[in-house]
Amino acid sequence: MLLTRLLNACHRFPGFVYEGARLDETTKTIEVQVRPRRGSKPCCSGCGQCAPGYDQLPERRFEFIPMWGFAVLLLYRMRRVRCGACGVKVEQVPWAMGKHTLTRAYMLYLAHWARKLSWQETARSFHTSWEKVCQAVEYVVQWGLEHRQQGPIRAIGVDEIQYGRGHTYLTLVYQIESGCVRLLWVGKDRTIESFEKFFTMIGKELAEKIEFVCSDMWKPYLKLIAKHCTHALNILDRFHVVAKMNLALDDVRAAEARRMVQDGYEPVLKKSRWCLLKRPENLTDNQRVKLRDVLRYNLASVRAYLLKEAFQDVWNYDSPTWAGKFLDQWTSQVMRSRIEPMKKFARTIRAHRELLLNYFRARKAFSSGVIEGLNNKAKVTMRKAYGFRTFGMIEIALYHALGKLPEPKLAHDFY
Ligand SMILES: [Zn+2]
């Protein structure tokens, strides 16, 4: 029969034979009988050694890759073995592991699609459940984490990302050198204790060989980086610096907009948020018109906006010395501005002046947009992750999307 021939061509295992297939039209299921090849010996699932048979268990059903809208099930009665080392154990079968009802081929297949679609869409596309897609991804990620090579690591970026409601954060560590950009680690919270686990994972030897660490100004991060990456240049990441300044600008705008409404002024700042936050070259036509309008007023938001735009020039410097002079001038100007949130940002910049200048000392080493790109991808993954409420699920989804993990190999590629 065609189906058993197909299976023999792409999913064949020595020691087992496909015995024929049956289509059940009411349940839209194809059932394929599998049996041990005559004379083949079962192997122990505990240690992998072949052992004498003990008895046979009731039939189990393993889900294989569906075909033309039909579910495909492999039916097999597992044998138990009497293993010299492990005692009476169920046999090991090459198409599945442990208690999983999904075959490995099907898990790899689902996990592959779950990287392109959301888990929900994957489940719907293959008439399976969200939980099974989740199992599949979990299997692939676990395998990948066990088999990946961690080092050598030259440059890392530390980032945090908000998840769930309120102020819950994840700490993400990326490898960011050219030729190897990937998520290395996900940690719950952004505390010393959580970040410390990353260094435990990679070990002292790898940590000491890291040359560059890009991070934001979060104190626990800075502390641990200095402690563990003893030979690295710690660089304040451009993306995080700009994000912090934008927060300050947004505070100014929001407070001023509220005040204007209270005092009965014309609401000129209404819908101005993105006009002020975006770089001028990224504005839409409408936003450009709106910005031109807002800039005519003598507002703290406008002055803060002009300071923000002036700050962006710093990135054009090549020399750390000149960049430093620019920063000193800019921060003095801000300190005279009487705009409190911007002054607070300027003080932060002064406190971290050397770390920020490390950006210029290292800038030829790697491109600075890398962390921002990864951060965006991580956010998309979390947004697509409808239904991921637990940290464990989010962790798996992020590793799956960004970890560039190795995957178990099958003899045939099903996708
Ligand atoms: Zn054994």
Image (cartoon, helix red, strand yellow):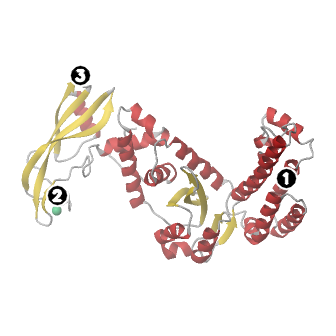
Amino acid type assigned to the residue bearing label 3 in the image: Thr
Q: Are marks 1 and 3 in contact (CB under 8 Å)?
A: no
Q: Which mark is residue 304?
A: 1
* Up-down relation of residue 185 to residue 79 (above or below): below
In which quadrant of the rendered image does the N terminus lie?
A: top left
Instruction: Measuring from the top left, give residue 271's x and y in whole percent.
Output: 77, 37
Task: Give the mark toward the camera: 2 or 3.
Answer: 3
Position above or below: 415 against 356: above
3D distance between C-alphas at marks 1 and 3: 69 Å
Residue under label 3, please give it.
Answer: 26
> Which of the marked residues, 2 or 3, is nearer the chain's N terminus?
3
Q: Nearer the viewer, residue 384 or 238?
A: 384
Q: Amino acid at mark 2?
A: Cys
Q: Quadrant of ligand 1?
A: bottom left
Q: Specify the label residue 178 is tagged with.
A: none
Q: Secondary structure at mark 2?
A: loop
- Local secondary structure at mark 3: loop
Mark 2 near ligand 1 (CB under 8 Å)?
yes
Q: Which x, y percent locates residue 18?
A: 18, 37
Can you give x and y, in whole percent of width and height, for residue 257 in the image?
A: 81, 44
Residue 142 position within the rendered picture, expressed as x and y whole percent measured from the top left: 38, 55
Location of mark 2 (residue): 44
SS for dot 1: helix
Mark 3, other Cα within 10 Å: few <14 / some 14–19 / many ≥20:
few
From the viewer's perspective, is residue 308 above or below residue 126? below
User: Marks 1 and 3: which is nearer the front?
Assistant: 1
